[in-house]
Every structure is written in structure tokens, then in C-alpha cells.
Amino acid sequence: MYWEAVNECMSREEIEQIQLERLQANLLRVYMNVPFYRKKFDELKIDPDSFCSLEDLKKLPFTTKEDLRDSYPYGFFAVPLREIVRLQTSSGTTGMPTVVGYTRNDIRIWSNLVARILTAGGVSQSDIVQIAFDYGLFTGALGLHYGAERIGASVIPISSGNPQRQVKIMRDFKTTALVCTPSFALMMADAIRSMDINVNSLSLKYGLFGAEQWSEAMRQELQDRLKIIATDNYGLSEVIGPGVAGECLERKGLHINEDHFLVEVINPETLETVPDGTTGELVITTLTREAMPVIRFRTRDLTSLISEPCPCGRTFKRISRIIGRTDDMIKIKGINVFPSQIESILFEIEGTEPHYQIYIERRGSEDELKVLVEVSEAIFFDQIKKQKELVEKIKKRLYTELGISVDVKLVEKNTLSRSEGKAKRVIDNRKI
């Protein structure tokens, strides 16, 4: 099922021709209208008129979130404020939020791109979509809202928070598609169980989850507990919001809307492009954004490009699941560790609950990693011997997979704090 089959199934030649034409126009736009890019281009002696190949992209400077923050609030806008019809910000997860603006045409394109993602994930005009993202300056909720309305689905703009109320609305309104973070979806699954509701009595069919990293093991947990097909989608405010990429029902990578975004994967240390299939940092250049085009934006998200054809028939390249961020990576005793790795291991061990928290402490000159894991009541109140056996089992698996020793502590169910937005998995108590 496609939203725009003509565009989503173009040949590679057609895609690359559109990308080149749009890149050329975009470079002229930013040079003429954005002081940051004009200065950068002049310093590097880059002539926007000289670009005749996509390979030339490597000559262009990178843009970072710090650049956007330094130009707060409107320094990156390429149109006058009178043409901006909406102002929003990033979530501010990694620091001060960045301001993003949209023209009327940006909103139209954005809605269409999200419609593609929702359609690829199974949503149609017949669905009732419950959006449990926070409705505010964060781009997630409104972006998905407009996309769902674009395809003609019924939208419940419930916003985030109060899992019990969410479940009641879900049951009473016969929600068929749930849109939220995967961690909040787990909270809803807990609420369904605590309210003694038979999940099979609900009308849920699809879950479209994003805004945070999550593992394949968590996908399986959500599918089992909510009886849904769970798909991943990706976006970021600095580029447009949700709608950059999303999984189809094959769930073999996230299709990038390549006619609107030019993507690269680079080695974050050398800044050189890496081959398809190699993990690196995702870099995005917008091709059609009017209000706030960005060139080679370093997302800090780690993924790899998939160029093999997808069985669904879409011809856009895909990215693999985001495994973490360069600024999320935990370096312990020379070993790089991502929370998603720990999550995958914990989900495979019977008796653990799908809630955990990672603590980093510094003892003397060495860093130590400790993981608090919620366990079922039966295990928490079981014999000390059985608890110790579970701890040793978790430690052994973590050591085998990660290559470092990890301290593990079992905690009672519902002990760890819950987030109704993006989950905070890592607490770094080091004084560096």
C-alpha cells in the first residue's frame, strides 16, 4: 500500500536527477538568504552555481546543532518572518532547544511525507489514530496529526500522559493505531494489565513508534503485549520533524523520503563517508524545505544505509534502526556501549520487566556501570538464592555481549521512574 506510488517507486536515475535539481536550487537559496551559509561558502570558495553532480556534496560544510543554537532564534530562516506560518522547537533532549519555522508550503509537504510514513506502516482512511505525543512546541504530535488527517484517518489528539485515561479512550473510541514513544507504549501495556482489560477486546492493529531509540526485543514485547504490528519511524525537528523515514510492513529498514532529503552516513571521527551497510553518523541535507533549509546537518544518530531493494516495491534507500547517538554512547574502560545493546539483552532474560536504568559512577580513576532492572513480583519476593542466580545470569550475558563487567541490581516492579515523553535510560553521575 502506497500513498504516492509514482514518487515512492521511481527509478534510481529519476530519484538522483530530482535530488540534483533540488540540491542546486537549495544551495542558491541558502547562499542568498542565510548569512551562516553565505559566510561558510565564501570562506571555502564554494560557488553554488558550480554544482553539477551529487558527488560534489562532499565539498559542502557540515551544519551542527550548535550552529543552529548560535543563530537563535531566527538566524537560519531563509524567508522573511511574514512568510512563516508556524514556529516550533526541538524537544531539547540534549540541551537548549532549537527553533524551527515552516512556510505554508512546508506544512503541505510535511503533511504529505508523514502520510507516506503512516501508509507504509499500515494506516489508512479507515483507521482511528490515537496520538499520544505531547502537543506543544515539540514537532512530533502536530506533524503526525496533520499526516493522519491528510490520509483521511480519524485522529484522537489525546497528547501524552495518564496511561489509564489513554487506555480508557483507546477502548471506548476503538482506537486502531497508536502513535507515541515505545517506552510510553510499554506504560500503556502495563496500564491495560493493571486495569484488568483483555487486550484482545481492544481494536488496536498498528503501533507507529518513534522519538527515541528502541530495540528489536522491545518491538517484540510491544507486539506481544498490545497485539499489534509495531513499526519504527524517524525524524528530527531541525530537518522537518517526523516524516524523514519510516518502516513499511516488511520491517526491514526505514525508507528515506529521498526526493526531499539527501542522506549520507559518515565516520563521526574522520568525517568521511562510509560504505553502505557500515554504521556511522547520519547526515541530512534538506531539498525542499523553504523556511529553514539545512545543508549536511549532523544528526548525531548512528545507523547504516541499506541500498538493496525492499520487497514492498519502494525504491528509496533505507536506514537501519537507529542504534544510539554519538553523544549517547557510553565509553567504559575503552569499550563503547549503547543503551539499546543492554536493552536487547535484558528483554531476552525471563523474569525481567521491560524497565531498566543505567548508572555510571566513577570510583577512583575507573568508571563503573550499574544497571537497575525491574523484575516480576514472583522473583523479587522469591528466595535470595534465586535472585542471586538471576543477577549472575544477567551479569554473564552482559559481559559476554559487551565485553565489560556490569554491576546488576534487581528492583521491585514499578520502582524505576517512568517518562511520559522520551525515556531517560542513562544517569551519568561522573564528575569529569
Image (cartoon, grey):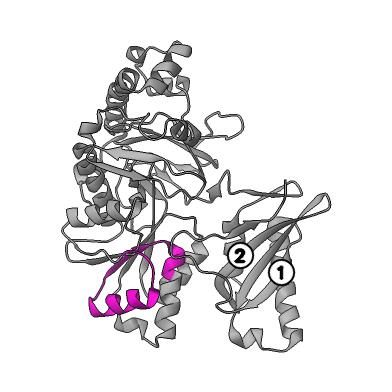
Residue 83 at x, y percent in the picture: 21, 33
Give the secondary structure at mark 2: strand
Q: Are marks 1 and 2 in contact (CB under 8 Å)?
A: no
- Residue 233 has which mark? none
Label tally: 2
Other residues around mark 1 within 10 Å, as few (<14) / some (14–19) / many (≥20):
some
Image coordinates for residue 97, horizontal then vertical, percent: 44, 44
- Residue 271 versus residue 117 in the image, above or below: above
- In the picture, residue 361 is in which quadrant? bottom right
Name the residue at 46% across, 30% down.
63
Magenta segment:
159-185
Question: Residue 364, how many percent across, how many down?
Answer: 84, 52
The CA span between labels 1 and 2 is 10 Å
Res. 357 mark: 2
On whether residue 162 falls in the magenta region, the answer is yes
**Front one among 92 and 171:** 92
Location of the C terminus (image quadrant): top right
Residue 161 in the image: x percent, y percent? 39, 68
Instruction: For residue 87, say whether it is visible.
Output: yes
Judging by the rendered image, the residue that carries numbered circle 1 is 408
Amino acid at the residue labelled 2: Gln
In the picture, the quarter occupied by the N terminus is bottom left
Circle 2: is it few (<14), some (14-19), or many (20+) Cα within 10 Å? Answer: some
Q: Residue at x 62, y 61 (%)?
A: 342
